[in-house]
Image (tube, helix red, strand yellow):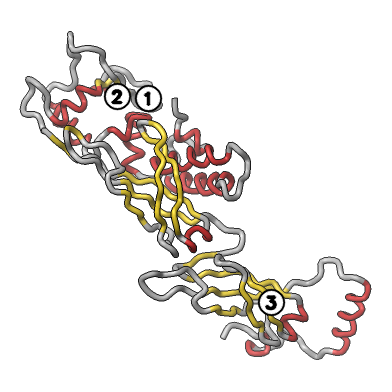
């Protein structure tokens, strides 16, 4: 039996959307296979992704709270159709019609059937029959399209930058399903990738719905993505910032070089045009390297001597300098 989604994310059943999202981001960052090399991390990551895909969507969460792990089999407009059926007498047992398959509300301790406020012991065949008609109770709808479904697709910044093909596995009502997804280079956070016919099953001979994968960029230790621009800290020694230097700078596509002008201070941004996220339909973004001056944490005796000589010889006062003197943003 699948673990309860709330238990997977470690949140209470009354958690709000912000609590659910915070729990997901923390656990996804800890268990992403590209970050965590523990053999069990990939399985935990898939479980976390499945739980979040349901609890982050208000409608899916509502269905999950009602029907537990069978929630994906319930059409989106189940409340309207069931409401119409319940008004005509509710769901009854059917003597002599074979074994009954029931759904129970996840976490519910209320018995007595649909009319009692819970969903204990609802007959799945009666439920679907009440929605679409069945023998002896009115016309039967021959076909109904399956519901579209969504799941999150967590990507590292490098994966989103490069694009390409990625193998993923999602847990569905019939067990794990594997997909090969084509990721466009430079895909943005929130972008939806459509997998036609991979959503909910249709009823009768109705077509299956579509599966939409929503891209979520994972937090990165170096890169901060804003639209198509990428920001990265560029750490410099005091003499590199004062005298100027050509130094390496990391980018999602590999290491590059940047020329630091003499007299640069912390906070100054150096632009590498076209080195941000690619855009097949237009111009790529830029990469901004923001200077951060670092000092030796434990200077040697010689370094202390040289810094003391500089302090005695220099008339520079950073608390009285102008923006241009500081090499600030231009």
Residue 171, percent across and down?
41, 36
Mark carried by residue 295: none
- Which type of secondary structure does the marked residue at label 2 adopt? loop
First reached walking from the N terminus: tag 1 or tag 2: 1
- Position above or below: 6 against 250: above
- The answer to whether mark 1 and mark 2 are in CB contact below 8 A is yes
x, y (%) of residue 126? 19, 22
* Image quadrant occupied by the C terminus: bottom right
Q: Residue at left 42%, top 54%?
A: 215
Q: Which residue is mark 2?
A: 119
**Going by the image, does 68 lie left or right of 233?**
left
Q: Residue at x 34, y 21 (%)?
A: 110
Residue 246, image x, y percentages: 69, 81
Q: Secondary structure at mark 1?
A: loop
Label 3, on which residue? 247
Disc 1 versus disc 3: nearer the observer: 3
Q: Is residue 307 above or below residue 154?
A: below
Gap between marks 1 and 3, in whole Å?
61 Å
Front residue of this view, candidates 180 and 231: 180
186 relative position to 249: left or right: left
Q: Name the residue carrying label 1.
A: 108
Q: Is residue 56 left or right of residue 245?
A: left
Residue 23's x, y, as percent? 51, 44
Image quarter of residue 248: bottom right
Q: Which residue is rendered at x = 14% and y = 36% of the image?
A: 143
Disc on the earlier residue, 2 or 3: 2
- Residues at marks 2 and 3, CA–CA distance in whole angstroms: 65 Å
Can you name the residue that lies furthest to the top here?
Answer: 96
Indicate the secondary structure of the residue bearing disc 3: strand
- Residue 27: which quarter of the image? top right
Q: Residue at x 19, y 30 (%)?
A: 82
């Amino acid at each position: 039996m699948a673990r309860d989604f709330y238990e997977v994310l470690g949140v209470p059943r009354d958690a709000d959307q912000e609590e659910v999202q915070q729990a997901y981001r923390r656990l996804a960052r800890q268990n992403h296979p590209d970050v965590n090399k523990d053999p069990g991390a990939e399985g935990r990551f898939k479980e976390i992704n499945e739980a979040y895909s349901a609890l982050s969507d208000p409608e899916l969460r509502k269905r999950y709270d009602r029907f537990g792990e069978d929630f994906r089999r319930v059409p989106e407009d189940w409340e309207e159709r069931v409401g119409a059926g319940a008004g005509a007498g509710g769901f009854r047992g059917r003597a002599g019609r074979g074994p009954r398959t029931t759904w129970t509300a996840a976490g519910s301790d209320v018995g007595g059937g649909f009319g009692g406020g819970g969903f204990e012991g609802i007959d799945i065949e009666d439920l679907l029959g009440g929605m679409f008609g069945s023998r002896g109770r009115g016309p039967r709808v021959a076909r109904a399209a399956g519901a579209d479904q969504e799941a999150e697709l967590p990507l590292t910044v490098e994966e989103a930058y490069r694009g390409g093909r990625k193998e993923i596995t999602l847990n569905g009502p019939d067990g794990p399903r594997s997909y090969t997804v084509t990721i466009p280079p430079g895909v943005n956070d929130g972008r939806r990738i459509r997998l036609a016919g991979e959503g909910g099953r249709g009823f009768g001979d109705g077509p299956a719905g579509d599966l939409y994968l929503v891209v979520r960029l994972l937090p990165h230790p170096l890169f901060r993505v804003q639209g198509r621009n990428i920001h990265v800290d560029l750490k410099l020694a005091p003499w590199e910032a004062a005298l100027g230097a050509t130094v390496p700078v990391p980018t999602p596509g590999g290491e590059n070089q940047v020329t630091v002008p003499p007299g640069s201070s912390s906070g100054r941004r150096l632009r590498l045009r076209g080195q941000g996220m690619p855009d097949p339909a237009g111009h790529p973004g830029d990469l901004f390297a923001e200077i951060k001056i670092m000092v030796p944490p434990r200077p040697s005796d010689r370094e202390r001597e040289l810094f003391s000589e500089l302090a005695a010889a220099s008339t520079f006062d950073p608390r009285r300098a102008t923006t241009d003197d500081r090499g600030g943003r231009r």
